[in-house]
Image (cartoon, rainbow, N blue to C red):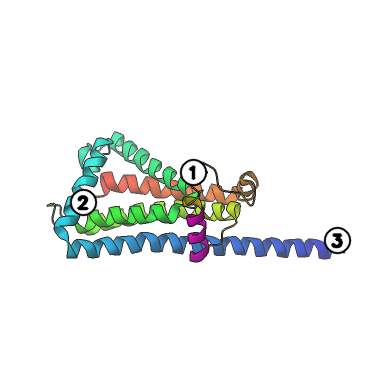
Amino acid sequence: MERIKKKREHGFKKVIEKMNKQKFLKWFKINSLCFIGAFIVIFLLVQLFPNIMLGFWAGWASLMEQTGTKGAAEFSPDFNTFFSILCRNSISVSIVFVVGLFLQAPILMIVYGSFYSLVASLSSLTGITFTFLDWILIATEALFLIVSATFASTLAAEIFGVKPEIKQILDYLKKEWMDWKNPWAFPEQKRNWRIVFKENKKEFVLFIIIILALLLFGAWFEVWGY
């Protein structure tokens, strides 16, 4: 009996692991579609209304300048530049992860998708030559943002009991956004976040390794890869 029990527990564990992988892949698909969808929409808007979108980008660039954001072109190509870009990208990944823990990652992916689309689509109008290497950089940065959003979304889905389905996500977002009585209240947890994090310790380590590798490559490529 004990042997059968252990076998069943092992089989159940395998099923749970498989389900988690399926959920991760579904969230990856959702976040990727939000990013790519926003990228395509903004690209089309630039083709239809170039002057309007150029003015919109000017406002966005001005806001970034006021917050002290810098591009690689403003640094000298050395280790300090590499470290600065690594820190900048790490902050972006951290923000995406924290926001993703509240299941808001798809919204943030739309914002980032729009931003990168404006950079790429308006390059010819702003006098910037956009090369194949620039596309590699965008793809790398998009990947570490989407991976961060996806891992956070997978954990959040377990905590708040939301399946990676469009209807459930929209219902969840609608409920959270329309709760005017408690705008600063945390969403109701279906499972304790400490337990969820504890169950996914190995996955968390793997996530950190993957993100770190992508961040290091992105910073190296932006400084020395061109």
Residue 73: assigned label: none
Q: CA distance from mark 3 to mark 2?
A: 67 Å
Residue 2: assigned label: 3
Task: Measuring from the top left, give residue 200's x and y in whole percent.
Answer: 60, 50
Circle 1 sits on which residue? 183
Q: Name the amino acid, label 1.
A: Pro
Residue range highlighted in magenta: 164-175
Task: Measuring from the top left, give residue 59's x and y in whole percent.
Answer: 21, 45
Lateral position of residue 87 relative to residue 69, left or right? right
Q: Residue at x 56, y 65 (%)?
A: 22
Looking at the image, is mark 3 or mark 2 earlier in the sequence? 3
Q: CA distance from mark 1 to mark 2?
A: 30 Å
In the foreground, 46 or 206? 46
Which is closer to the viewer, label 1 or label 3?
1
Q: Name the amino acid, label 2.
A: Phe
Lateral position of residue 97 relative to residue 69, left or right? right
Mark 1 surroundings within 10 Å by alpha-carbon count, few (fewer than 14), some (14 through 19), many (20 or more): few
Task: Measuring from the top left, give residue 112's x and y in whole percent.
Answer: 34, 53
Task: Please say whether residue 165 is visible from this viewpoint.
Answer: no
- Secondary structure, mark 2, is helix
Q: Residue at x 44, y 43 (%)?
A: 94
Circle 2 sits on which residue? 56
Q: CA distance from mark 1 to mark 3?
A: 51 Å
